[in-house]
Image (tube, rainbow, N blue to C red):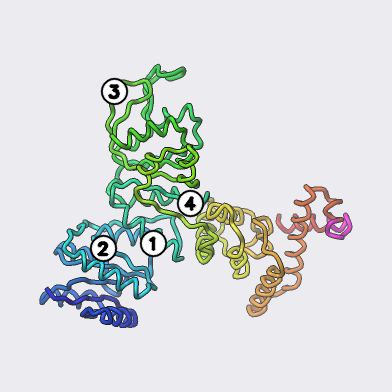
């Protein structure tokens, strides 16, 4: 075995800057441009540590990682510009000790190598065949890359996970990703929103009940814990759980045993708990509304989801995905955003986060009249940006249309402007045409004529 650090990447520039940073840290480095040359070198010696890219011509880095782990060669650090849940989880499941999302900070990369070398004597987790899953979680921003990295690292464990974040950030999607990338993926994923169930029924929902346990209980019913046996139980809005039920849940987490409501049979369960909340549990503990010991049982690993406003660069990707997905789901003609419209979508505020953006895109997929979504089509969505941004969008659209040699540009723009103003005025006046006309400064007959013309064109 050599004391060399091997870098495998088809990008010569990445190899050069990373190798120089490692050499400056006093390490010996050897560079490879493809997997085949690594395999040939392994006939002669082994590295102290190997860093590999994921996507390269020919064999990819994950297949190399699997082969190295089978031969107990490592540790291995994976690098990739394609950071998603499936790739990150596959890397950790196959035995990677760390995952560096490109572009990475060189100091962070050097520190990762040094940590791996320091713990090289510790046993590594071996992996079997790498299984990739499609996930609804999307994003390429730094906050989401960190979320993907954390999911990949903890998915294969059986540790309880607490997911925090504002409403609409995708907490259930993270819970599903944790389940699908775990060894429990062949078993059930059961989700329960604890805030949506009346407190008097929640105990029965969780633990089931025996026939005759209460009025209307005519037969034995299995609860969510039994339904999730061997799999994952996702408890959403855990912060709203009543205190009395918190005590019983704590006993189950501590001992893995429970009784059905009205039952005497002790049931032992094997369930992984993933909980989520938009509330600050520490504040609820301080207020006496949540048990501190239960919080510590649930909060073994915490994944905090960023609000959409902190990852605006992901909005165009998400918007185009939701628009295409809705068209496919509802069997509608495909639509696309114009550059100006997509820019406006990315500039909006979304208090409801990703869920609000998805609802906007679903609405546009159904009601936007053309195959291309224009700025005027966004008037029915969330509040538009202030100032002169709408004229900037109009200017951008006009420049694009003129460059493409499109006809009737002025008439189309006027039509879109009239339509947008009419819709806004009718909405503000709750459908009262006289008030809408007065607010716009036009006659009622003019308003009626334009509304009629608009309906004729749409039909």
In the picture of the structure, the residue carrying the numbered disc 1 is: 84
The image quadrant of residue 72 is bottom left
In the picture of the structure, the residue carrying the numbered disc 4 is: 165
Foreground tag (4 vs 3) = 4
The CA span between labels 4 and 3 is 38 Å
Q: Residue 34, percent across and down? A: 25, 77
Number of marks present in the image shown: 4
Q: Is residue 307 shown above or below 81?
A: above
The CA span between labels 4 and 2 is 27 Å
The CA span between labels 3 and 2 is 44 Å
Does the segment drawn in magenta span residue 441? yes
In the picture of the structure, the residue carrying the numbered disc 3 is: 265
Residue drawn at 22 percent across, 78 percent down: 27
- Depth check: 184 or 403 in front? 184
Q: Residue 341, percent across and down? A: 62, 66
Residue drawn at 16 percent across, 63 percent down: 121
Q: Secondary structure at mark 2?
A: loop
- Depth check: 420 or 127 in front? 127
| The C terminus lies in quadrant | bottom right
Mark 4 / mark 2, whichever is N-terminal: 2
Can you tell which mark lies on residue 97? 2
* Magenta stretch, main secondary structure class: helix
């Amino acid at each position: 075995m050599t004391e060399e650090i091997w870098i495998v990447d088809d990008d010569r520039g990445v190899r050069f800057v990373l190798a120089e940073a490692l050499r400056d840290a006093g390490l010996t480095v050897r560079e490879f441009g493809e997997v085949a040359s690594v395999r040939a070198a392994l006939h002669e010696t082994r590295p102290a540590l190997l860093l590999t890219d994921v996507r390269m011509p020919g064999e990819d880095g994950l297949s190399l990682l699997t082969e190295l782990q089978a031969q107990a060669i490592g540790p291995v650090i994976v690098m990739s510009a394609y950071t998603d849940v499936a790739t990150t989880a596959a890397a950790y499941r196959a035995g990677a000790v760390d995952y560096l999302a490109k572009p990475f900070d060189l100091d962070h990369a050097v520190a990762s190598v040094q940590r791996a070398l320091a713990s090289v004597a510790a046993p590594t987790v071996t992996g079997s065949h790498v299984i990739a899953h499609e996930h609804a979680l999307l994003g390429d921003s730094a906050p989401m890359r960190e979320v993907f990295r954390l999911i990949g690292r903890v998915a294969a464990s059986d540790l309880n996970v607490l997911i925090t974040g504002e409403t609409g950030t995708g907490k259930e999607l993270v819970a599903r990703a944790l389940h699908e990338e775990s060894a429990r993926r062949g078993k059930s994923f059961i989700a329960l929103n604890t805030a949506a169930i009346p407190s008097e029924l929640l105990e029965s929902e969780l633990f089931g009940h025996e026939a005759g346990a209460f009025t209307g209980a005519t037969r034995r019913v299995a609860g969510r814990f039994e339904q999730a046996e061997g799999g994952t139980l996702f408890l959403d809005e855990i912060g709203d759980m009543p205190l009395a039920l918190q005590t019983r849940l704590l006993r189950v987490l501590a001992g893995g045993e429970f009784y059905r409501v009205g039952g005497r049979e002790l049931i032992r369960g094997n369930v992984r708990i993933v909980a989520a909340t938009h509330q600050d549990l520490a504040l609820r503990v301080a207020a006496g509304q949540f048990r501190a010991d239960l919080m510590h049982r649930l909060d073994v690993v915490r994944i905090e989801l960023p609000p959409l406003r902190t990852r605006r660069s992901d909005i165009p990707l998400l918007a185009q995905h939701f628009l295409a997905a809705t068209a496919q789901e509802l069997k509608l003609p495909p639509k696309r955003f114009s550059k100006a419209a997509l820019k406006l979508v990315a500039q909006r505020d979304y208090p409801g986060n990703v869920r609000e953006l998805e609802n906007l895109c679903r609405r546009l997929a159904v009601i936007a009249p053309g195959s291309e979504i224009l700025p005027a089509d966004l008037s029915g969505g969330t509040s538009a940006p202030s100032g002169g941004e709408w004229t900037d969008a109009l200017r951008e659209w006009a420049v694009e249309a003129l460059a493409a040699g499109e006809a009737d540009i002025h008439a189309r723009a006027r039509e879109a402007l009239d339509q947008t103003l009419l819709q806004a005025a009718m909405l503000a006046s709750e459908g009262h045409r006289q008030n809408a006309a007065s607010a716009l400064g036009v006659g009622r007959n003019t308003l009626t004529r334009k509304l009629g013309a608009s309906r004729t064109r749409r039909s």
